[in-house]
Image (tube, rainbow, N blue to C red):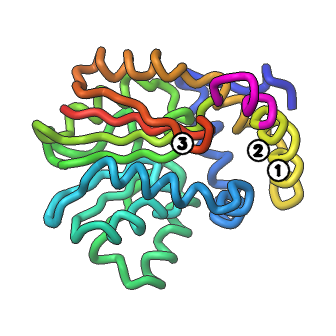
Amino acid sequence: MAENHFIHAGSEKKPRVQAMFNRIARRYDFLNHALSLGIDIRWRKRALEMLGLKNGERLLDVATGTADMGILALENAAIEIIGLDFAYGMLTYGQKKLRAGKLTSQIKLIQGDAEHLPLADESVDAISIAYGMRNLGFIETSLAEFYRVLRPGGRVAVLEFSLPPGKLFGPVFNFYFQKILPFFGGLFSNKSDYTYLPESVRHFPSRVDFMDLMLNEGFSDVVHRDLTFGVSTIFFARK
């Protein structure tokens, strides 16, 4: 699919992305882990380590998908987790995983919008979002919502794909994302859904620009950490 078929920001983006994730929900976990060679799990764990979760805290996992992030978070601490996603299909498969793992009392999944979080002010200790920020229509609005629901001193970790810096690994990354990933993704799903991924990464703000967005919404101690040659980046901040 041509690049101009994609909408990368604004109100029209939301229903299209929502429909896409509902379509791929059944095979999402398999393809996500297979196409990343399992490295995505390690990246998620690194983001959770940066959050430094403590027993008794409350974590909001935005764009929770099939609840991978929440399940991994329970390995670090005895916490309460709210997993929010706007794609009902993803939550359906996430709920199946929670029932299978007997985790429904520890992780609550809700359908909701990151731009209008159904939570009270200063009601969570930490927020995570893994590979979901670039799918939002209005990044600034969502960051403002994150800030609103975080308690003073609360932490946020944004894990996102990024463009590797430098001339050595960048071409390899681009070839894989633009050629290999859509091809193999298309064997199991709609090829255009996996063509969207590299385009959305390319349209996401740069590391510096995204950190500026976080600072503009009031966050402090904003830092980023590149993973695996810069293929993924963790953005961390405090309220």
Residue 98 higher or lower than 188, as above or below: below
Q: Position of residue 87 (x, y in %)?
A: 54, 51
Q: Residue at x 35, y 29 (%)?
A: 223
Q: Residues within 10 Å of mark 1 (few under 14, many from 20)?
A: some
| Magenta-colored span | 164-172
Helix, strand, or loop for circle 1? loop
Q: Pointers 2 and 1 in contact (CB under 8 A)?
A: yes
Which residue position holds label 1?
Answer: 190
Q: Nearer the viewer, residue 149 or 86?
A: 149
Left/right of residue 148 with respect to residue 19 in the rendered view: left
Q: Residues within 10 Å of mark 3 (few under 14, many from 20)?
A: some
**Comparing labels 2 and 3, the label whose residue is closer to the camera:** 3
Q: Residues within 10 Å of mark 2 (few under 14, many from 20)?
A: many
Query: Predominant secondary structure in magenta?
Result: loop
Helix, strand, or loop for circle 3? strand
First of labels 1, 3 by sequence position: 1
Q: CA distance from mark 2 to mark 1?
A: 7 Å
Q: Which mark is residue 227?
A: 3
Image quadrant for the C terminus? top left
First of labels 2, 3 by sequence position: 2
Q: CA distance from mark 2 to mark 3?
A: 22 Å
Left/right of residue 171 with respect to residue 102 in the rendered view: right
Which residue position holds label 2?
Answer: 194
Q: Residue at x 48, y 63 (%)?
A: 68
Q: Which mark is residue 170?
A: none
Q: Which kind of residue does numbered mark 1 sit on? A: Asn
Residue 57 higher or lower than 95, as above or below: above
